[in-house]
């Protein structure tokens, strides 16, 4: 059973100093995720969603407790080992897209592959495939400034998926998108989850995202208040 978890946290605590006291961003979180989940952390602003994603994404380490991601204890990893885990296995999608403005769409997606040992030809195949998945193959030569918000976030999804990671962590990915683009990107992510088996974990308080989740974890004050399996309530497609 143990080995069937992709992510397993135990009594995860993260504190930040505040004056003479401290803030508990996470206050004893026990959460396990299996391969192929489409799950979301929801809860009010400040409840610890981003902190949790950053720790399981090996961008940050816990104050105490444990996070085991793909068999690796996050709290024991050196910077180099943490970078290796991220580069190989974890894709990130952020609220603000975080594309590099001087590079083309193609180069933004290719960038993440440069850290892996791969021939130029293999990289090209993978980048073009990822751009096809997000329906932007025809914009490979564009610069981010020439794209809409919806298209920019599609590039960010391509960048996250191009190395076919086991896990994609998406922090408020629809916060800067209108409803139609939100539904389109969610349809794409759900398709990637289904077809590639990629595990998606969201941090969100957007009802549109929540409709797509198969598991909804509610955080309140750094604690898991609720962890529910959801019926699929959404109507497919972005035309509602
Ligand atoms: N780098 C930091 N320094 C100090 N406090 C922080 C830092 N990051 C987060 N916090 C605090 O930790 C709590 C949880 O933050 P966060 O994980 O960003 O919540 P959420 O993503 O749910 O809005 C908040 O009270 C926030 O102010
Ligand atoms: Mg946040």
Image (cartoon, rainbow, N blue to C red):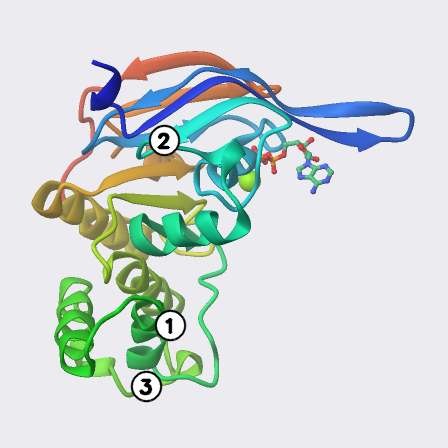
In the drawing, does residue 102 fall left or right of residue 228? right
CA distance for labels 1 and 3: 11 Å
Mark 2 or mark 1: whose residue is earlier in sequence: 2
Q: Residue 40 carries which label?
A: 2
Q: Is mark 2 on a helix, strand or loop?
A: strand
- Name the quadrant of the C terminus: top left
**Label 2 vs label 1, nearer the camera:** 2
Q: Could you tell me if residue 175 is visible in this image? A: no
Q: How crowded is mark 2: few (under 14 residues within 10 Å), some or many (20 or more)?
A: many
Q: Which of 63 and 99 is in front in this view?
A: 63
**Who's the residue at 42% across and 12% down the image?**
226
Ligand 2 within 8 Å, label 1 CB: no
Which residue matches tag 1? 148
Q: How crowded is mark 1: few (under 14 residues within 10 Å), some or many (20 or more)?
A: few
In the drawing, does residue 12 fall left or right of residue 226? right
**Who's the residue at 28% across and 30% down the image?**
6
Q: Which mark is residue 142?
A: 3
Please determine whether, in this image, residue 45 is positioned above or below residue 107: above
């Amino acid at each position: 059973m143990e080995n069937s978890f992709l992510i397993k946290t135990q009594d995860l605590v993260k504190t930040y100093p505040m004056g003479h006291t401290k803030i508990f961003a996470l206050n004893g979180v026990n959460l396990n995720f299996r391969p192929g989940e489409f799950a979301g952390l929801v809860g009010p602003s400040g409840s610890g969603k981003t902190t949790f994603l950053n720790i399981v994404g090996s961008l940050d380490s816990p104050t105490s407790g444990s996070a085991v991601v793909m068999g690796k204890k996050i709290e024991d990893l050196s910077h180099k080992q943490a970078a290796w885990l991220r580069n190989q296995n974890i894709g990130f999608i952020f609220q603000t897209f975080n594309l590099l403005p001087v590079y083309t769409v193609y180069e933004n997606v290719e960038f993440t592959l440069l850290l892996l040992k791969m021939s130029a030809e293999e990289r090209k195949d993978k980048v073009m495939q990822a751009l096809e998945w997000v329906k932007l193959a025809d914009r490979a030569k564009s610069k981010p400034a020439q794209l809409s918000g919806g298209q920019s976030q599609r590039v960010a999804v391509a960048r996250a998926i191009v190395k076919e990671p086991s896990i994609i962590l998406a922090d408020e990915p629809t916060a800067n998108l209108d409803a139609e683009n939100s539904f389109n990107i969610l349809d794409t992510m759900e398709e990637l989850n289904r077809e590639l088996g990629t595990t998606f974990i969201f941090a969100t308080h957007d009802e549109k995202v929540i409709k797509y989740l198969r598991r909804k974890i509610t955080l309140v004050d750094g604690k898991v208040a609720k962890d529910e399996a959801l019926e699929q309530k959404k109507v497919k497609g972005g035309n509602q």
